[in-house]
Amino acid sequence: MLNSSAVAQQIARGLVSSGVTEVVIAPGSRSAPLIYALAPLAEAGVIRTHVRIDERDAGFLALGLARGLRSRQVGAATAASAAVGGAVALVTTSGSAVANLHPAVLEASYSRLPLVAITADRPARLRGTGANQTIDDQSQVLSDVRARVDVPAGSADAHHLLAEAVAHSLGTGTSEAGPVQFNVQFDVPLVPTVTELAEWKATVQTVAARGANEASTSAFSGLNSGNARDGAGNTPDAARSTSVRIFPGTVIVAGDAGGHSAQALKSLAESYSIPVLAEPSSHLTSELRNSPTAVPAHARVLSEREDLRTAIRSVIVHGKPTLTRPVATLLADSEVLVQRLPDDVDAVSLSVSLSAADGTGASASNGDGVLDGDSASNGDSVGDGAIATAGDRYSHAGEDTTWRDEWVSAGEAIVAASRREREVESKPSTARAVTEHLAGRSINLFAASSNTIRYLSEATDVRARIHASRGLAGIDGLISTATGLSLALEEQVVLVIGDVAMLHDVGGLLTPSAEEGGNVLIVVLNDDGGAIFSGLEHSQDHVAPYLERYFTVPHGRGFSDLATAYGWEYSRVGLHDGTSLLDDFIAEFEQAVVSVDDGMETDSPKTKTRGRRIIEVNLT
């Protein structure tokens, strides 16, 4: 039986051998053995640790790190290298601290992002006794996890169990990536002896000297070769494939895919002239920016063009589209064939078959009509020759663009009409104008839920890399998530957020003195409450008396004092005579923003002076 320090060191070995490089820690006594195991690894540069006081913010910081790691790996050469190391570990003490991880764990689950929550616990003999900070079955506290493990005190199997937990979080051939709860019981003593700590530090230094890659197969190895997996959770030689069938009346609906790319879908849409209904945080939004297949204002086209909507026979779905009711209604239509593709579609071979209006068709075979992530990322696409053997009538499948053009033209007409209407409005929406200005910049733009992301869905000039938490589309933890995203990308992230969502995560403004705070520029659109409810059914005359107190909830607060208290630079733009509010915002924004194309180094003076700034746009 091992003591707690030895168990924690086994867990640390499991993290390193599994390629985990980012660990978020919330302080606590019961988790102390993990601190003494992980801190020397951070000092040696084997991993990077991030400490946050509040477990809730720690969870969302880890969520942002996981999203950022995946976004960075999109351009990797192979599926395995694109995903290994993508899991983020999260360490907490026992008791209610674990429950505070739940909002972030739920978002990770529904965004399919790999988190490993390592929750320290008291030994099992204290359960059911009323012991301090002891939940009777702490390993069951977090719902919606891909797997859960309860490691007994003194277990000699922690290394292998941890490695298996990381593999589960990254996803297997039959399950999606997502969070895992790794509950580990620690008995006293919780602090290593002088000798134990010195020996562990010596081991870590040896590992660091050999280099991280060698370390994972030598000093910190121990994984059975039968358990070796790539980051997608597959054995290295396992081929993954999926297929889609294209009917007349097929559209592609793309939602947030947790940072995964979709080059294969881009090729599919362009080769077969398929209309693409992409939400802002889908990679297809940026990848199809200059493509004739992207449908602007697609939700309104679905609502206002009944002829096009009822002509849809099949929907190819990528990611998790959750933004609009018309899309949700479409996907729930029992008369429409819904074909869902994996988030990591570029890591699989995608085969295509075509069906005629009468239901007959031909399938590509022997490699014909196959799209895969590697070929797509190299600029290849499925064209005429690729499906030639599937039948002569399909050899020019992409030449008839009528279906696609009808959708795109309908969207363009709606956008043009909306612009004309806004031009004659006495009080045009500054919030929309600010959001559209941000979308047109080459920046990392993290968009909060509610109105912000909806404005982006109707923007037509989107140059920003758009990120969003769309798993459950909540408004909590967004400052912490944006901070984690910035730390993972090692680039500036612009967070555009409403005042209510900002207040939800005030704790995310706090970065402990010894910690990295990322490079985050917050644009807070303050209209004094939840304005989105005014545009929903809650503003009908017979229920309007309840709207303000119970839904929009005005608070009368600005953010100047909060910025000062938490050490953020601050500026404010508001309504006044003279220049427009939008012009004032643009002038202020340009002083603080860093373009993605600037090639900025994270330790440059520019980073230090431009990070951690709040621009409040007063809309009241």
Image: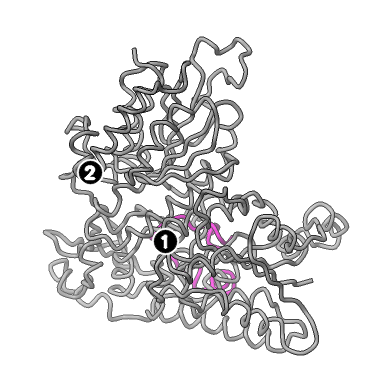
Residue 390 drawn at (x, y percent): 16, 66
**In the image as oriented, which residue stretches furthest toward the right?**
545
Which image quarter: residue 496?
bottom right
- Residue under the image location 46 percent in, 79 percent down: 408
Which residue: 52% across, 59% down? 468
Distance (Cα) linking label 1 and label 2: 25 Å
Image position of 395 with respect to 265: above or below = below
| Residue 92: x %, y % from top left | 51, 33
The residue tagged with tag 1: helix, strand or loop?
A: loop
Dot 1 amino acid type: Glu
Label disc, if present, on residue 209 of the rendered structure: 2
Residue 275 placement: quadrant: bottom left
The boundaries of the magenta stretch are 300-329
Residue at the image point whose x is 29% and y is 70% from the top: 267
Using the image as rendered, state which of residue 78 and residue 130 is in the foreground. 130
| Labels 1, 2: front one | 2
Q: Which numbered disc covers residue 490?
A: 1
Rendered-image quadrant of the C terminus = bottom right
> Is 579 one of the magenta-colored residues?
no
Image vertical order of residue 393 relative to residue 532, above or below: below
Q: Secondary structure at mark 2?
A: helix
Lateral position of residue 161 relative to residue 511, left or right: left
* Location of residue 272 in the rendering, given as x and y in whole percent from the top left corner: 30, 73
Left or right: 263 in relation to 29: left
Residue 6 at x, y = what percent?
Answer: 35, 22
- Quadrant of residue 388 in the image? bottom left
Q: Earlier in the sequence, mark 1 or mark 2?
A: 2
Q: Residues within 10 Å of mark 1 (few under 14, many from 20)?
A: some
